[in-house]
Structure formats: structure tokens, C-alpha cells
Amino acid sequence: MDTVLAQAIINGLLLGGVYAAYSAGFSLIFGVMGVVNLAHGELIMLGAFTSYWLFAYFNLDPYLSAPVAMGLLFLFGYVVQKYIINRVIGQPHIMSYILTFGLHLMVANIAIKMWTQDFRSITTSYSGANAAIWGLNIPYARLVTFIVALFVTWGLWFFLMRTETGRAIRATAQDKEVARLMGVDIRNIYAITFGLGAAITGLSGSVMSPFVIISPEMGLEYTIIAFCVVVLGGMGYMPGALVGGLVLGVAQSLAATYLNAGVSVAITFIILFVMLIIRPRGLLGKGSVA
Amino acid sequence: MNYRIDRIILILFLMFTGAVAFVPYLVQSEYQLRVVTVVVLWVGIAGCWNMMSGYTGYIDFGPVVYFGIGSYVVAIAMTKYSVPFFPSLFLSGCISAFVAFLVGIPTLRLRGAYFAIATFAFAEAMKQITLEFDRTFNVSFFQGSDGITLPISNYENSFFFYCILPVTFLVVFTHYFIEHSKFGYALKAIKEAESAAEISGVNTTANKLVAYVMSAFFLGLFGAIEAYWITYITPSDVFNVQKTVQMVIMTLLGGMGTFLGPVVGATFLTLISETLGAQFVEYYLIMIGAIIIVAILIMPSGIIGGLKIRKKLRFI
């Protein structure tokens, strides 16, 4: 295997890890509530900005501020679901798409007002540092994000499978009426689910902050990629986000290496379109179909 | 009773359209004419979305693709093959409709969020393909991000006003036709309960496809007229997802699946963006976001939809 190909695949896997990290929350929110959260990218943006400001004012390392981002985003998600999105549960799904789109506009534009449109970045001692193994470059920061993605997927799986709240969330996802009859407080479970999804998304935004460009307008393109990743992996199937992320990352990286970056974006959308038509349940066939 | 109100509304609508046709003689400045033209254009475009998504409940997140195809067909036909405007215009509509037919067959089998995402993906893919086609295959056809400059016309703004008005009229009139035909009932049945409609003998696929192709045909026409009006198009402009968003929001504000919904919603939002947008540029998008959230929370069926429920009207 030649070095260019190997490097392209490694880049793809690392990129896929990043995709997987921030798409898991999208999949969770869709899987449980059927809400396609168009404000998903804004959650990443808020996570990244939390780390940015803590770094700028207190010189706190992004990896140390990640738990703070997680906590703040949990609160944000909980409140948004409890007081806004819960009001349209039970109405046609379009309402939730448009509502979250409204949220996207508000959050992104308020952020522009507060923090201006400037592009920002966090420069740490390890930003841009690479591990060189057999002539291949592996950037540390991306490797850490990759590991975080694995951890998030595992943690979420563990939480949903082994805890009482997790069981309640799964029950609600399967049949909310029956879950309610069994004594589950649906509205509270929804708020917790959205909070949880927001928290892991904020966490990934925070661990991505050492190597991405941070700006209030960054959100939408992340939302679009998350869409794609989750469709590839299977909507609502947690480990699917990891598979979808890695497949998409490698496909994009190969297209960008051998063709050009613009074509790689076109390929992303063509894959998404074709996948939906031929395999709407995702590559593993375990996603839910509306 | 309802039928009489319905007749009255139709007559009022025809009279109103007739009155609008005199606007170019009444306006004081080219700016005012331009605003009115943009309002009429958006009433039509939002109407195209309503025709498909409002009635069937299938949320199309990529209608802008047919607008873009219309723009590109007219641009390529006029610049590369020097076809006159009106034949190219007709060609735009037909090609948009044909693409919609091919795309509709597989995508209309998808439901809910899957249909929404698939249409969105198709629109974005087409945008990227027009952007990258020339560079990848080393030809000069779509002219990528350089865009295409159309032949500059000697026509005044009023010419474009009179191009757009009949198309918009046709779109709104098609709504009236939908409301009063078996076809309309089929679409509404699909929205309420698709499987039940299918069991009752409604050919759901064919009905959805007809609605989808019709809306694509009109969108192609609007895309073509706007391209000739603006005279310069780029893929990121004509395939801009922002256009889709506007269609959705306008229809939703007015009332989805109603005859007058897009008319009211598009007029309201265009006038707001002309007034508020010009005065409070920095806060404009925050306000639009807030309007969307408040509208969804307090009047989920839109202005006309709410009226329809309160007054128990059947057709407006």
C-alpha cells in the first residue's frame, strides 16, 4: 500500500472520528423524539465557544474545559426542550423542523451580535503537533477526538442499556403512550434526552476546538454533515453514528486526495441521496424508518 | 353557505389580480415596482411549495433545485444556443418537470424526515455538480463558480412584472383547482393517512408525482424569469438553500395546505424584510428566528389556517 493512500485513509478515519463524535447526539435526539434538530450545529458552536472563552480568559486547556461545556450545554438543551420543543410534541414533525430552524437562526445571529463574525482559533502547545509512525502523520488533537468519539458512543450505549433513566428513554422511544402508562414522565424524559444529546455535542465541540475554526456561523455545515452521518449509520441507532462517521470520513478523504475538495462535497450528497433511496435503514440496517 | 363564500373569494381574488395588473401604472418609482414584483414572485414560489408539501404533508426541503435548473436551462439555451427568451422559458419549465419526474419516482416512496433529507441532499448535490462539473471534466458548460451572464435585455422592470404575474396567477389558480377536484381530495387523504388512502383505492404514488412535477414546472418558470431579470447567475445563488427556507416559512406563516396561505405569508414576509430588514439589518435574522418560533408556538396552522378553523370555512 503506498503512503499517499495510507495517509488518505488515516486522515479519513480521524475525520470520521470527529464526525462520529458530534453526530451521536443528533441520532439520539431523532431516535427518541423524531425531532430533526436543525440547530444541532449551534450546539457544537456553543461548545467550542465555551472552550474558547475559558482558554482566552483563564488559559484553561480545552480538554479541561470540556466538562464545563458539557454541563452548560446539558442545561441549555434541557431548558430548550422543556419550554420550547415540548410544546410541539404530538404535532406533525414539520413543526419541530421549523421550530429548530428558528432556533438555529436566533442562536447563530445572537452569537454574531455578541461575539462578532470573526474567525477564531485556539492555539495550544499541541495544536498542529503530529505523531509520525512509518512515515505517516497522525495529528494528536484529532486522535484525541477520535478516542472521545469511541468513548461517547460507548458511554451513551452504556447509559441507555444499564441505567434506569436510560431504560425510560428507550421505552419512550419505542412507545411513548405505553411508557406513560408505566409511570414514565414523558416530558421530563424528553428534556433529559435533549439535554444529554446537547451535552455530548457540546463535549465534541469542545474537544474539536483546538483544530477547527470557531465562528458563530460555523453551525449549519456541521448540521448537514451530521445529517449525512446519521443517515449512513441508521437514524436513531447509536453505534451507527460511529460507523457512518468513519465511512463518510474515509470516502471524503479519498475523494479529496484523488479528485478535489469540491467533488468530495458533491460525493457526500450523492452518497446521502442514494443511501436514502436504496437503504434508508443505514449501512447496518438497524436504523428506524418513519 | 360555504360554497357561496368560496365563490365570493374566487371573484375577489380575480378582481384583486386584475387590480394588481395595473400596478406598473400607479407606482411612483422603479423601487416600488420592484418591491411589488418581488412580492408577486414570492407568492408564486411559495405557492409552488404549498402545492406539493402543503397538501400532501410531504416536506420537500429541496424545491430550490427546480428553480436553479430553470435558471440554468434558460441561461444555457440563450447564451450557448441563442434561443429566444420565450421558447427557452418554456423549455426551462419542461426540463424542470422532467427532472422532477425522474427524481420523484424513487424519492416519493420515502416518508417523513427521510423524504425531507433526500430532497435536501439532491438539491445540494446539484449545486455542487454545477459548481464542479467544468473543472472536473475540463469543459466550459456550466461555468462553475464564475456564473453565467445572460444577454442583457432592453426590457423595463414592468416587462418582468408582466412575465411573473400570469405565472403566479396560474399557480394560485391551480390551488383553487386542487381544492375543488378529486385530485385535491387525494392529496389531502395522503396527508391525513396515506396507508388508508391507498387501501381506499387512491393511487398515492401517481397523485404525489403529479403534484411534485407540477410544482417543479412552475418553479422552473420562476427560475428562468428571475435569471433573465437579474441577468447574472451562479450556482450558490440560484441553488441557495435560503430560498427553500423562505418558501417553507412563508407558507407556514400563511397556512399550509390552504388556497390563500402562500399569498398572505409571502406578502407579509417580503414586506417585513423590505421594511424591518432595511432599518434593522443587524437584528433582522434574530427577529425572523423569533417570528418563526412564536408563529409555530401560538398559531401552528398559520394566519389563513387559523382563520379557516375558527370560521369553519372549507375552501380558502
Image: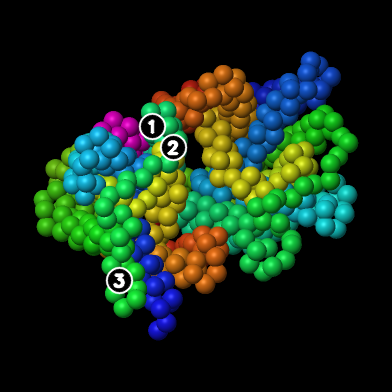
Residue located beneath label 3 in the image:
A132
For this orientation, the residue located farthest to the bottom is A1
Residue at screen point 40% across, 78% down: A3
Residue at screen point 45% across, 55% down: B114
Question: Which disc number belongs to residue A115?
Answer: 1
Q: Quadrant of residue A184?
A: top left
Is A279 drawn above or below residue B82 in the view shown? below
Q: Position of residue B25 (x, y in %)?
A: 84, 19
Chain label for disc 1: A
Q: Which residues are magenta?
A: A78-90
Q: Position of residue A257 (x, y in %)?
A: 49, 69
Q: Amino acid at mark 1?
A: Trp
Residue located beneath label 2 in the image:
A118
Q: Is residue A98 magenta?
A: no
Q: Is residue A179 left or right of residue A223?
A: left
Nearer the viewer's eye, disc 2 or disc 3?
Answer: 3
Q: Is residue A82 magenta?
A: yes
Q: Secondary structure at mark 3?
A: strand
Quadrant the C terminus of chain A occupies: bottom left
CA gap, disc 1 to disc 2? 8 Å
Q: Secondary structure at mark 2?
A: loop
Nearer the viewer's eye, disc 1 or disc 3?
Answer: 3
Binning the other alpha carbons within 10 Å of mark 2 as few (below 14), some (14 to 19) or many (20 upward) gives few
Chain label for disc 2: A
Q: Amino acid at mark 2?
A: Asp
